[in-house]
Image (tube, helix red, strand yellow):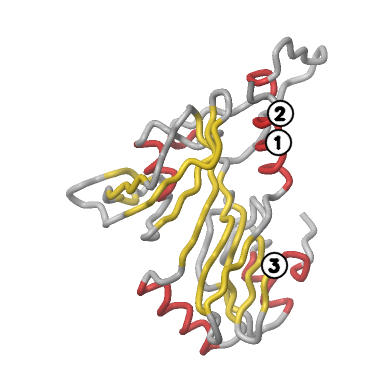
Amino acid sequence: MKVRFQDLIVYENDHFLVINKPPYMASLADRNDPLNVQRLAKEYHPDLSVCHRLDKETSGCLLIAKHAEAYRHASIQFEKRTINKMYHAVANGLHEFRDLQIDAPILAMHNGMARIEKRDGKGAVTVFDTVEVYRNHSLIACKPVTGRMHQIRVHLSAEGAPLVNDTLYKGAPLYLSNLKRNYKLKKETEELPLIKRFALHAVSLEFDNMEERVKAEAPYPKDFAVLVKQLRKYKF
């Protein structure tokens, strides 16, 4: 994957950058993968520091500080929960969420998964709103109030709305043959899912940029855009 850091930038001022993180790229240093946002940022300018992280498969808005004071300023905002993050998720099933607040503690486990655990879990709150419904799927806006491991994925799965292709949390893959009637696959070919990762994108980030409060937005990457386009096309 060849990526030019400057091509990822969707917002910039004297103190911060917001990039549209590609899917399949780690946010911070990853010993299993030399290509990560932190490394790209440092190569672009040595003073840049990633302020938070997105799961490797998750695309979208990622905040980067240009200097130490900006990094501290962002850290305080994350600690006080004054940074508003909004994600879009494509979920299996039809769901009409209207300002649905899920308050369910999450426990991170040693096997790389997380689960709802009332006794030992850490407080986790997410607000969900349905954006669009299709034939058998839903596009859902997700606002995490807290920042627990796999929070959106765990909370949606618990509501019977697992993300498309999130096999870790009971999310089924989606194929064009599921949507298109009389779909015929070419002989001796294997059908691939419409999206090869779990369908989650960090669509916007609202924060204080040390001058004013701003909202940065990240357009859907190609795979997420194609998924939504096909769902709309075969909605009926």
Q: Give the labeled residue for mark 1.
A: 229
SS for callout 2:
helix
Real-space Cα distance between discs 2 and 3?
A: 28 Å
Considering every residue shown, the one lying at the far bottom of the view is: 69
Q: Quadrant of the C terminus?
A: top right
Q: From what the image shows, is residue 162 above or below residue 209?
A: above
Badge 2: few (under 14), some or many (20 or more) residues near its Cα, within 10 Å? Answer: few
Residue drawn at the location 56% of the way across and 66% of the way down: 28
Real-space Cα distance between discs 2 and 1?
A: 6 Å
Place of residue 47 in the rendered image (x, y in percent of width and height, measured from the top left)? 63, 85
Q: Give the labeled residue for mark 3.
A: 10
Viewer-proximal residue, 189 or 180? Answer: 180
Counting residues from the start of the chain, the first of labels 2 and 3 encountered is: 3
Place of residue 146 in the rendered image (x, y in percent of width and height, measured from the top left)? 36, 60
Residues marked 2 and 1 touching at CB (< 8 Å): yes
Q: What residue type is labelled 1?
A: Lys
Numbered label tally: 3
Q: From what the image shows, is residue 173 above or below residue 56?
A: above
Real-space Cα distance between discs 3 and 1?
A: 22 Å
Q: Give the labeled residue for mark 2.
A: 233
Viewer-proximal residue, 12 or 32? Answer: 12
Residue drawn at the location 53% of the way across and 58% of the way down: 54
Residue drawn at the location 63% of the way across and 62% of the way down: 217
Q: What residue type is labelled 2?
A: Lys
SS for callout 1:
helix
The answer to whether residue 189 shows anywhere in this view is: yes
